[in-house]
Image: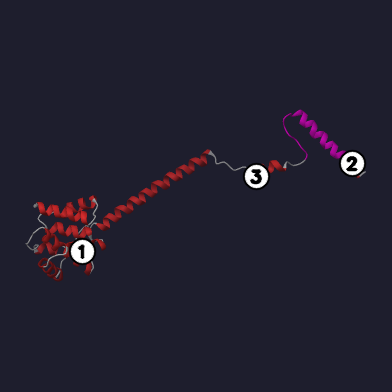
Amino acid sequence: MTGAAGRSGGEGAGGFLSAIGRLLPGMRISAEPDEAGADEEEAAPVRASRRERRADQADAIVRDALSQKVLRAWLQNRNQTLVPLALNLRSLDAEGRTLVVRAMAAAQAATGQDAAPPGDLLARIGAGEAERALLADARAQEAGLGGLLDAVRARDLGAYAYAASLMVLDQRRLVSRLYLAFLASRLSLPEDVVSSLDRRYRT
């Protein structure tokens, strides 16, 4: 009895769905769940909407702009740390002071400038008695320019050495200008750094 009722109910449901299918041609109607269709829906990738794509593009543009600003700020700060705003020997350690003073002596020796730098110039750059004595000794000795400039570069003191040389040389003389050009090239100073130092320390 129950089996007959079940068969009757199943046939009734099947007949009802068949009738609906005839009324709505082209539509697949089944009493059983469409497991294949469900799997396809789950497997189908979710496509981003146009609004989401535009938001992603905007985020990428913002990230790129911020990255460029950070890089530009870093480069500017790096140049500021390499270029002394004011040449002060007291801001350097003992080895740094020695190298810069020797660079001053080498600049004078290389250009044949015999006169000692004026005392007020040395005071202006923070030279104490030890630096004054060192400068006098260095000027009295034959300077080994190549080794000195290598040591200056190794300590990243190229801008300091160039600025100090600018201050002690008579830049009206052609040989002084040529030496400064050689020094900038030998110390691998960028053109913008050289221009900045020329404006600040040219006498």
- What x and y, as percent, mark residue 80? 26, 56
In front: 31, or 139? 139
Return the residue nearer the eye: 94 or 200. Answer: 94
| Residue behind mark 2 | 5
In the rendered view of the protein, which quadrant contains the N terminus?
Answer: top right
First in sequence, mark 2 or 3: give its number.
2
Q: In the shown orientation, is residue 106 left or right of residue 58?
A: left
Q: CA distance from mark 2 to mark 3?
A: 37 Å
Give the class, few, some or many, for how many residues have Cα within 10 Å of label 2's Cα (few <14, many ≥20): few
Quadrant into which the C terminus falls: bottom left
Amino acid at the residue labelled 1: Gly
Q: Is 26 in the magenta?
A: yes
Residue type beneath disc 2: Ala
Which residue is found at the position 77% from the left and 31% from the top? Answer: 21
Q: In terms of secondary structure, where does tag 2 sit?
A: helix
Which dot, 2 or 3, sits closer to the camera?
3
Does 194 appear above or below 117? Answer: above
Which residue is label 1 attached to?
Answer: 147
* Residue under the image location 84 percent in, 39 percent down: 10
Q: Which residues are magenta?
A: 3-31
**Mark 3 or mark 1, which is nearer the start of the sequence?**
3
Residue 126 occupies quadrant: bottom left
From the viewer's perspective, is 77 left or right of 9?
left
Give percent across and percent down for residue 190: 24, 52
Residue 157, above or below 8: below
In the rendered image, which residue does mark 3 sit on?
42
Instruction: Report which quarter residue 122 is drawn in.
Output: bottom left
Image quarter for residue 91? Answer: bottom left
Residue 203 in sight here = no
> Which mark, by number, is residue 159?
none
For the residues labelled 1 and 2, the Cα–Cα distance comes to 109 Å
